[in-house]
Amino acid sequence: MTSLLGRQTALFDQSITVPAGGPVQVIGVDTHAAHLDRFGPPARLAAAELVQRVLDSGLTGRGGGHFPVAAKWRGVSSQPGRPVLVVNGAESEPLSAKDAVLLQLRPHLVLDGIEATASALGATEVVLWLHSDAHFSQHIVRAALADRRWDGPPVRIVATGQGYLSGESSAAVRALSGGPTLPSYRAERGRLSLADGRPALVHNVESLARIGLLTRGIDAGSVLVSVSRGAARVVLEAWPDWALVEVLRAAGVSVPVQATLVGGYGGRWLAGPDAGSSLRLADLPSLGAGVLLPLPHDECGLACSAAIVDYLAEASARQCGPCRLGLPMIAEAMAELADFRRRRTDAGQLRQLLQLVAGRGACSHPDGVAGMVASALDVFGSDVDSHLHEDRCRHAG
Amino acid sequence: MPAESKRLGLDPTRCEGVGLCAVVAPALIELDRWGFPLLHNEKGHPRRAAKQARRAIRACPHQALHQRG
């Protein structure tokens, strides 16, 4: 398989376009036979061998945190009890579609990764954590399991609500332990357990697909990204050494763009000239789960950011005071800035507010908001001035 | 990341902004505009700091503070 730019792809030979909102439904024919034709059979590896391959590849998690998989496995192995493998398919970034597309077009590759991981770590159970409205994904996984011999532990599909935080690892584990689907505070990061004390190993769908590739000795080194383009999301396989502008162009976005929001709603804005020139994916500080939102020149970055912060404030778990109280204040300040309602230079006060919420929640939700808004104030600084001192926006007219 | 200092860690999901911690540990804890604690590392007087840290942990009605280090 070769990509548009002539690179040997591992997962998809072309980009996949899905609508901007709603559950993803892509039709593919990934029978087990077709899967084995495409990728060959997986090797049956001893645990130590698979661990070595994961270590050698430097594989990092694809759920946004980029935590090294080998280190995560080491942590789980050091916890007493046999783990539960939680397959995190609750893709909750509204602009992300890569996990749904992967699960629907390459279910057997994901299942290979699940089987290999469960075996290597002695998992006694697999839980597939999906949104309740992801009916097609659920159907595809059930069909794929029925279409193959399954040597792994029993797989059960657990459906969750569509909230933004429902895909947060500790929220999933807490829900599976009979609690609410909200992040938990962990004095020791990275250690998750169920109510009965069993360790929980949470892996993103794409991470497991890549483990499935590793069982075949394929170390792809690629990343899946979701690029927003108009009323669509374009999922494509890209490489860390690609310039951001190449990725946007491959997704059919007309470049140069005004700016790009990298890493989802809680990511960082990058100004147009950087996004348009040589900055590579590997250089981006906040690629996260590969969500890219390019901003055309005729849209206002402050208005876009204000709408996002509004959504994120509403999505707060409301468990922690600074987040519960601070995010709505930030959203209000941004809305006023976007709507020309601010008459004094309050950007300084807004920045202080950002510092007051960052790092003070049980999860990284407020950190994402603070970082995204700070980057918006930087990148759209001249718009901040024109919004404060004039009654018009240079972009949206 | 939950707020923490060298001596104290805070579970922000338990904290209700009661503020007793800041009363008994003024060298270590300051309240923000919403009444929620900001944890600082003490400057000098490690014995006083240790004593205040213990008091703060005991004072919290929601057991939101714990010892670190």
Image: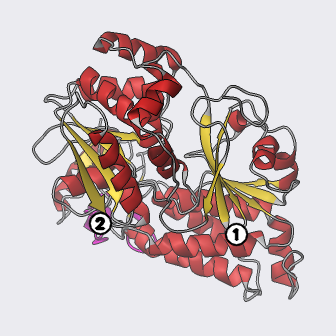
- Say whether residue B38 is visible: no
Q: Residues within 10 Å of mark 2 (few under 14, many from 20)?
A: some
Of labels 2 and 1, the one closer to you: 1
Looking at the rendered structure, the secondary structure element under dot 1 is helix
**Height in image: A210 above or below A182?**
above
Question: Residue A276 versus residue A185: which sits nearer the camera?
Answer: A276
Q: Is residue A226 left or right of residue A127?
A: right
Question: Residue B43 versus residue B41: which sits nearer the camera?
Answer: B41
Q: Is residue A356 left or right of residue A261?
A: left
Looking at the rendered structure, the secondary structure element under dot 2 is helix
Check the picture and name the quadrant holding the C terminus of chain A: bottom right
| Residue B3 falls within the magenta-colored stretch | no
The residue tagged 2 is: B23
**Height in image: A86 above or below A390?**
above
The amino acid sitting under disc 1 is Gly
Q: Residue at x 54, y 78 (%)?
A: A329
Q: In the rendered image, which quarter is residue A368 located in?
A: bottom right
Q: Residue at x 75, y 58 (%)?
A: A294
Magenta span of residues = B14-35
Q: Residue at x 44, y 64 (%)?
A: A164
**Height in image: B25 above or below A52?**
below
Q: Residue at x 36, y 71 (%)?
A: A318
Discs 2 and 1 share one subunit: no
Q: Is residue A53 left or right of residue A86?
A: right
The amino acid sitting under disc 2 is Val
- Say whether residue A325 is visible: yes
Check the picture and name the quadrant holding the N terminus of chain A: top right
In the rendered image, residue A41, in percent from the top left (x then y), is placed at 41, 19
Magenta span main SS = loop
The residue tagged 1 is: A348
In the rendered image, residue A182, in percent from the top left (x then y), is placed at 31, 61
